[in-house]
Amino acid sequence: MKFVKYIDDVYEKHLGDELKKLTRRDAHIDVVENATIVVNTKTHAYGIFDENKKVVKSGLQYRGKNHQFIPSFVSGDEYIDCDVMFLGNAYPHFGHFLMEHLNRAWGVVRAGKPGMKYVFIDNTGVGAKSWLFDFTKMLGIKKSDVIILNKTIRFKRVFVPWQTMNISGNWYAPEFILPFGAMRDNVPVENVYERVYVSRAKLPGRLRVYNEEKIQKIFEKNGFHVIYPETLSLAQQAAIVGNAKVLAGCAGSALHLSVFMRPGGRVIQLRRTYDVWDSGAVQYRLCMIGDLDFDVINASIEEVRSTHGGDHAPQIIGVTQYLKKFLDKNKFKYSQDDQDVDDAVMAEYRKDVCDFNATHGGSTKLKIKKKIVKITACFIPGRIWRGRYRTYMNKHFVNK
């Protein structure tokens, strides 16, 4: 893996510190006889229990040092006499589902078999997004064999593949990448493009990035085919990205589609915020596991600092000194006009900044409000009540 950085010293130090923490773990599949999966949609708690009513630790879903809420054991009224494989949570955010709740899907490749059912937990009672079934279909799993579990059921046997990715805890297992190669190889290939740029330009509201259309045109002039992931089926995305040798785009979920690429490819990430806490370390990890080269470039020209996670501040990118260095080093052809931000785009961005400041009092005030919520939440006893407090305060205090 070749890692090339076109970034400032502050971000380089942050990224270096994060990458030093990376650790590799083993992955196994536990088989639990006569297991009960307990789900409580009121408290959002769930857990796998063995026949001795003990929590199966490999079924805990970690983010950082914490895992999901674990309910008290209840026997439930239903028993299903079949083997099932636990695959995680039916989380409704595409990027987090891809990274955090498909990281057990490697078990399908290693131990899946005819007649087996596959379980995702719906601990909030909101159901599953349609793309969850797109993923399982690409793995060769029939929709009728997928169980979206929102109640307590006892099963004959539960297969529990170990978690292979903890995006906040800096550990991983190489098995994480296995199911994505299988998905790629299971979808038909219509068009093959050697270089692909994934664009956010057609996303709604502040999910889009100002001036990206102009930046992506530079890539397009230099042999990149532009796609808008939300306009394509997941199978089409897997086929296009999976057969590309180079993938470029702004940091975010769309660039995580690199999991479908073949070893030896290259990923080019454009940073869209000055905030150091972006997805750079996560994307590096994906490239490392997938044996892909990785270029990361400072491209933000924002005038009010945003965050990668979305604090509603508008984002804008441009040909910074770092992006220019990348373009020149890689012999991209571009003109002075390609580098200039159009007046109309800048005016629209600045108007959006004014609207943001009017709503939130500016990014500094917003950060202070978030800090207040974070600190005061520490005085709320119990993780469930702390979570409810943060949700309420974010809605009625932070985002007011």
Image (spheres, grey):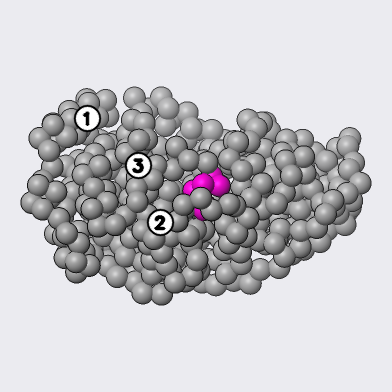
| Front position among marks 3 and 2 | 2
160 relative position to 104: left or right: right
Magenta-colored stretch includes residue 57: no
Q: Secondary structure at mark 3?
A: loop
Vertical relation: 291 (above or below) 221: below
Give the percent coordinates (x, y) of residue 291. 47, 71
Vertical relation: 115 (above or below) 30: above
Residue beneath disc 2: 193
| Front position among marks 1 and 3 | 3
Identify which residue, 375 or 272, lies in the foreground.
272
Type of secondary structure dominating the magenta stretch: helix
Residue beneath disc 1: 352
Residue beneath disc 3: 200
Of pointers 1 and 3, the one earlier in the residue sequence: 3
Residue at the (13%, 31%) spot, across then down: 344
Vertical relation: 231 (above or below) 283: above
Tell which residue pokes out farthest to the bottom in this image.
1
